[in-house]
Amino acid sequence: MLKNFSLGQRVAEDEVDELATYFVETEQWNRVWRGDVDVVYGPKGSGKSAIYSTLVSREDQLFDRGILIRAAESPRGTPAFSSLVEDPPLSEVEFMGLWKLYFLGLIADAFEEYSVKGEDAKRVIRLLNDARLRPGGKISLRTHVKNALDYVRRILRPTEVEPTLALDPATGGLTGLSTRIQFSEPSSAERAQGDIYIDELYAAADRALADDDVDIWLLLDRLDVAFVGSPEFEKNALRALFKVYLDLNDLQHVRLKIFLRTDIWKAITSSGFREASHITRELVLKWDRGALLQLVAQRLVRNPGLVQHYNVTPSEVKADTQAQTTLFKRVYPLQVEGGPNKPQTFDWCLSRTRDGSRLTAPRELIHLLTETRDVQMKWLEIGEAEPEGEPLFQRGALKEALPAVSDVRLTKTLYAEYPHLRSYLEMLEGQKTNHSVQSLAAIWRESEEKSKEIALRLVDIGFFEKRGTFIDPEFWVPFLYRPALNLVQGTAEGVTVEVNDEIEEQG
């Protein structure tokens, strides 16, 4: 049974085809599906990409509801916007122009693919093609980005006065006035030369969609890797994106659907972002205990051998919380650590995969249970005795699985995405799990003021949980990060409040 046992991939992008079989349709998902939400925030591994991928996989169902969808970023492989890192737009205005042209190109692609043929649709397509933004029609996302950026630079960084007369290349004769797409309202003289304001093209696109009684959703995910390498570049790009989102809010049939990590949103608004208060169609993904239990149970019943062995009906398990609890207790041992004050296994798993925000992301929970399977399988292969009773797993398999989860979270999330903080994390190796500003200053060899600033940054990224008071804060390391750094349970010298980890692990 264990040889064929699988809980799926912990990363949604790696299992797009399988995801639909055990996707948990929470109320959060329903709000997105109904179209009530445009911006989805969540920590890494919280399920943003799962929602995005499920929307893409249900394109036909959305079409039946009169909704066309376009993925505005590559779901796998190299992000479409990664090419901008080497030579990015210089200003927020250029970024806004880039976003608007890019989305308009995707809308034109959709018009052709879905045969939206009204006069307004034809006009949008013709003007974009004439501007060389879609040479030859539909193009790749990366080419859309490149063409849009080239156009923005021609308009906003002109090196010479561009001719406004269009000539027939074969005869040299005058064919009419060329049209330039402008990013601000053209003057009367510019309009006389054929210039058009880009928002007028969006209005035309909106009318075309209204005439066909359809909407279009432009989906943006993987923004955490699209602009990697330069925090300032990322901030400019994403602030411009949200300003464009607000600019397009008056349209009735064009919606941006943005999936963004909460820590990135905090970073781009840390220095102030007046427009943030106007973003109201938003949702912060959070997983409570019941939703996480349902997630695990739905993945368990995808295993035919397990379903047969425990004689359960998948549909009944998926629909009933008590059935989910019972199945988990049959598959896994009742407790990982014995004792009247110790949590039962599922709650132990949640406490071990919870970060400093006190939230457990599905990714780490699935990773822990997958590693547990691998540990148990290895033990059986070398001749260890099978677990006693019904459970497939021994207590020790869960404990031995945790270090791998801890190491991946530390190295592939914190070290990879916050390299400027890595040295401070590494200096904590072998230290205690509860600290004051003074104890951290001694470890980091920094001033108390600087150490407090660093510690609060580590709170922001989920490494520390902040305790104590505003004046005298204390910083506690969750169980998730302890194995990777070989941390010693206890309180550093000078910290006044002892933390009872037995209470903490029970939530």
Image (cartoon, rainbow, N blue to C red):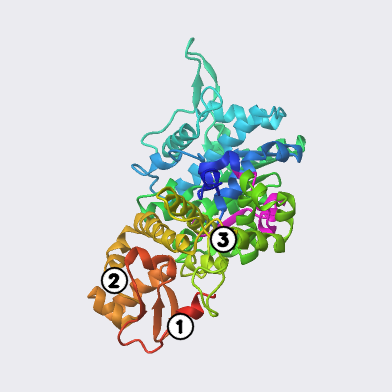
Circles 2, 1 touching at the beta carbon (< 8 Å): no
| Magenta residues, start to end | 19-44
Q: Position of residue 93 (x, y in %)?
A: 46, 49
Q: Position of residue 94 (x, y in %)?
A: 45, 46
Using the image, determine if residue 490 lies above or below residue 386: below
Q: Residue at x 28, y 71 (%)?
A: 430
Write down the quadrant of residue 86 in the picture: top left
Point out the image quarter for the C terminus.
bottom right
Left or right: residue 447 versus residue 400 is left
Tell me, yes or no, whether the highlighted magenta stretch contains residue 28.
yes
Which residue is disc 1 drawn over?
500
Which residue is disc 2 drawn over?
430
Q: Residue at x 51, y 70 (%)?
A: 358
Left or right: residue 320 versus residue 355 is right
Label 3 is placed on what type of residue?
Tyr
Local crowd at mark 3 within 10 Å, few (<14), some, or many (≥20)? many
Identify which residue, 391 or 410, lies in the foreground.
391
